[in-house]
């Protein structure tokens, strides 16, 4: 416990040093035009007011540091290494709901990642791009990758460090996107159209501390629409795995498979909207089979600060037949304020409700604050 407190204190002190000790300085580690080092230091604090039998109200904090090294020896070649460090698990370690109140990588997430006996190394990949013509390119990426960077992405709801904090608005959980494991991606861009094909090999914890190996495949098509109102991005994807996941009949195993839609659209310079829908087959044991979410993004230009923003989101998750959940609803709103040229602070409120099939329903309100420093 003392070691965890010490690690958390070091990251918090580092954050406030960046915010207070060097105001007005834009930190940059662009070694040269080919090599760059960048990072994000994030601190969160959340207080949960739980209406759940046997669970007391609680507050927890956590801090994380992500470091990335990017090397581009040519205009067509790119190498990336990303490391993640964290202290504390926030309210996620006490969370009584089916949704995590913070979707980021915390202390326990960064140890023995995916049962690979690997700590802190999140990404290590190489990408080569073929320029086939002025408007056509083909990119090929391989190594340790993160599927959330390629599938189910969204410009207004896709990053727990800068958008919403609840996992329902970062990526839909029933898409089962693996992160930080071996895989490859092929990306074809033809003018405003794009196609991404992803394949990964990963592991999931199957009980008693054991991990089961599986393959994950996804295909996403996207279109970027430019109108007088502003830019819009529309994506349709599907995914499947091999048959490694337990069925309700414990003698059988099946694959995870489904499809979804992710869209975002600007409605002028101030307002943007996003919508996500996803469906998953329920032959295997899963928690939610249908998820619907959407919301609004309001830019700070409305009050004269274009780097501020407000986000409002609502999600409905239908419980699968194999789950004890009937349905889950989530509401979240946040207000993010830029403090300096390299830092921001976000105030956040979440409401989560799990309607249960055979037991007492549970709900709660979670109040949070998030601080970021970028370099």
Image (cartoon, grey):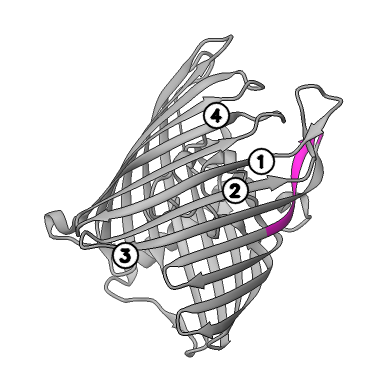
* Between discs 1 and 3, the one toward the N terminus: 3
* Tag 3 and tag 2, C-beta contact below 8 Å: no
Q: Residue shown at 64%/73% (left/top)?
A: 140
* Between discs 4 and 1, the one toward the N terminus: 4
In front: 21, or 181?
181
* Tag 4 and tag 3, C-beta contact below 8 Å: no
Number of residues whose C-alpha sits closer than 10 Å to that of mark 1, classed few (under 14), some (14–19) or many (20 or more): many
* Between discs 2 and 1, the one toward the N terminus: 2
Q: Residue shown at 63%/20% (left/top)?
A: 321
Q: Where is residue 176 drawn, in percent x and y? A: 62, 44
Q: CA distance from mark 2 to mark 4?
A: 23 Å
Number of residues whose C-alpha sits closer than 10 Å to that of mark 2, classed few (under 14), some (14–19) or many (20 or more): many
The disc label shown at residue 98, or none = 4
Report the quarter where the N terminus lies. top right
In front: 167, or 4?
167
The disc label shown at residue 257, or none = 1
Give yes or no for residue 203 being in the magenta stretch. Answer: yes
Residue highlighted by disc 2? 238
The answer to whether 289 appears left or right of 240 in the picture is left
**What SS does tag 3 mark?**
helix
For the residues carrying marks 4 and 1, which lies nearer the camera in this image?
A: 1
* Tag 2 and tag 1, C-beta contact below 8 Å: yes
Residue highlighted by disc 3? 20
Write down the region rendered in magenta: 199-208
Q: Residue shown at 50%/51% (left/top)?
A: 236
Magenta stretch prevailing secondary structure: strand
């Amino acid at each position: 416990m003392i070691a965890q407190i010490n690690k958390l204190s070091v990251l918090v002190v580092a954050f406030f040093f960046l915010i207070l000790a060097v105001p007005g300085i834009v930190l940059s580690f662009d070694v040269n035009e080919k090599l760059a080092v960048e990072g994000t230091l994030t601190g969160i604090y959340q207080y949960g007011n739980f209406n759940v039998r046997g669970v007391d109200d609680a507050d927890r904090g956590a801090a994380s540091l992500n470091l990335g090294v990017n090397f581009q020896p040519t205009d067509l070649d790119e190498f990336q290494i990303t490391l993640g460090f964290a202290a504390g698990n926030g309210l996620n370690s006490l969370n009584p709901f089916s949704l995590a109140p913070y979707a980021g990588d915390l202390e326990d997430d960064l140890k023995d990642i995916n049962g690979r006996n690997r700590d802190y190394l999140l990404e290590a990949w190489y990408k080569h791009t073929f320029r086939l013509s002025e408007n056509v390119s083909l990119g090929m990426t391989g190594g340790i990758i993160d599927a959330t960077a390629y599938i189910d992405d969204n410009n207004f709801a896709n990053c727990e460090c800068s958008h919403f904090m609840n996992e329902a608005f970062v990526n839909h959980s029933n898409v089962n996107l693996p992160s930080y494991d071996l895989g490859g991606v092929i990306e074809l861009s033809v003018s405003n159209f794009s196609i991404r094909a992803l394949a990964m090999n990963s592991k999931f914890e199957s009980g008693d501390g054991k991990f089961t190996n599986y393959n994950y495949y996804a295909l996403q098509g996207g279109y970027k629409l430019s109108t007088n109102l502003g830019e819009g991005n529309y994506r349709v994807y599907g995914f499947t795995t091999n048959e490694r996941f337990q069925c309700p009949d414990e003698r059988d195993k099946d694959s995870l498979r489904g499809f979804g839609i992710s869209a975002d659209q600007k409605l002028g310079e101030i307002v943007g909207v996003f919508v996500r829908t996803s469906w998953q087959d329920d032959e295997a044991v899963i928690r939610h089979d249908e998820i619907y979410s959407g919301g609004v993004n309001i830019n700070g230009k409305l009050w004269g600060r274009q780097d501020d923003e407000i986000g409002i989101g609502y999600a409905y998750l239908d419980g699968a037949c194999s789950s004890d959940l009937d349905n889950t609803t989530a509401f979240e709103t946040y207000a993010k304020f830029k403090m300096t040229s390299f830092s921001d602070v976000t105030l956040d409120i979440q409401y989560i409700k799990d309607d249960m099939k055979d037991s007492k329903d549970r709900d709660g309100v979670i109040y949070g604050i998030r601080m970021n420093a970028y370099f």
